[in-house]
């Protein structure tokens, strides 16, 4: 059964970032689940199917990229956006090495929303990905 809203898992160690992302995405019709610990995020990400994943590269020293890699093991077709507020050239490289779908420099919410909308149309449906994950 397909959910009525696109579901997004958001990982950030900053409560204000999670709150802002939740507000921005909810206004655009997304159902947002947030996680502020890596363990919780892995359990939630691998235990449920999400339409999109939005992960902070800088989460506890790069754990966002490790979560991206873990999600790829559970859901290889998942659209994943990594974001970072750090102004360092290695952030994009880290996102690409983790097999992220897109990288967005935070805190530009409109670029994040554009990235979300752009990949949502080309992504496999949740039911297709759930069936793939069972095999």
Image (spheres, rainbow, N blue to C red):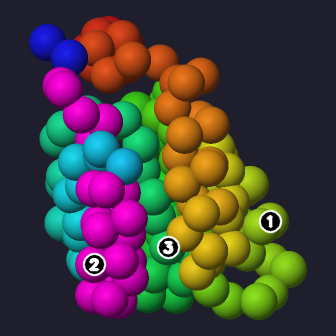
From this viewpoint, which residue is outermost toward the front? Answer: 27
Q: Secondary structure at mark 2?
A: helix
Which residue is found at the position 30% from the left and 46% from the top? 30
Residue where numbered disc 2 is placed: 19
Between 89 and 135, the one lying in front of the other is: 89
For residue 75, which numbered disc appears in the image? none
- Is 103 located above or below residue 129 in the figure? below
Q: Secondary structure at mark 3?
A: strand
Left/right placement of residue 77 relative to residue 13 reads right
Between 11 and 97, the one lying in front of the other is: 11
Do labels 3 and 1 touch, CB within 8 Å?
A: no
Separation of disc 3 and disc 1 at Cα?
Answer: 14 Å
Few, some or many residues within 10 Å of mark 3 (<14, 14–19, 20+):
many
Between 59 and 121, the one lying in front of the other is: 121
Which residue is found at the position 72% from the left and 56% from the top? 97
Residue where numbered disc 3 is placed: 56
Count of all numbered marks drawn on residues in the image? 3
Is-magenta flag for residue 5?
A: yes
Which residue is found at the position 54% from the left and 40% from the top? 117
The mark that comes first in sequence, 2 or 1, is 2
- Please provide the residue range marked out in magenta: 3-27
Residue where numbered disc 1 is placed: 93
């Amino acid at each position: 059964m397909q959910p009525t809203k696109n579901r997004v898992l958001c990982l950030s160690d900053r409560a204000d970032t999670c709150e802002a992302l939740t507000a921005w995405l909810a206004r655009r019709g997304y159902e947002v689940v947030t996680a502020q610990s890596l363990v919780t995020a892995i359990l939630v990400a691998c235990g449920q199917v999400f339409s999109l994943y939005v992960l902070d590269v800088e989460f506890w020293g790069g754990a966002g990229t490790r979560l991206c890699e873990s999600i790829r093991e559970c859901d290889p077709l998942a659209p994943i956006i990594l974001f970072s507020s750090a102004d360092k050239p290695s952030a994009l490289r880290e996102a690409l090495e983790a097999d992220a779908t897109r990288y967005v420099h935070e805190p530009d919410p409109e670029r994040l929303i554009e990235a979300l909308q752009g990949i949502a149309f080309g992504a496999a449906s949740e039911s297709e990905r759930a069936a793939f994950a069972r095999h």
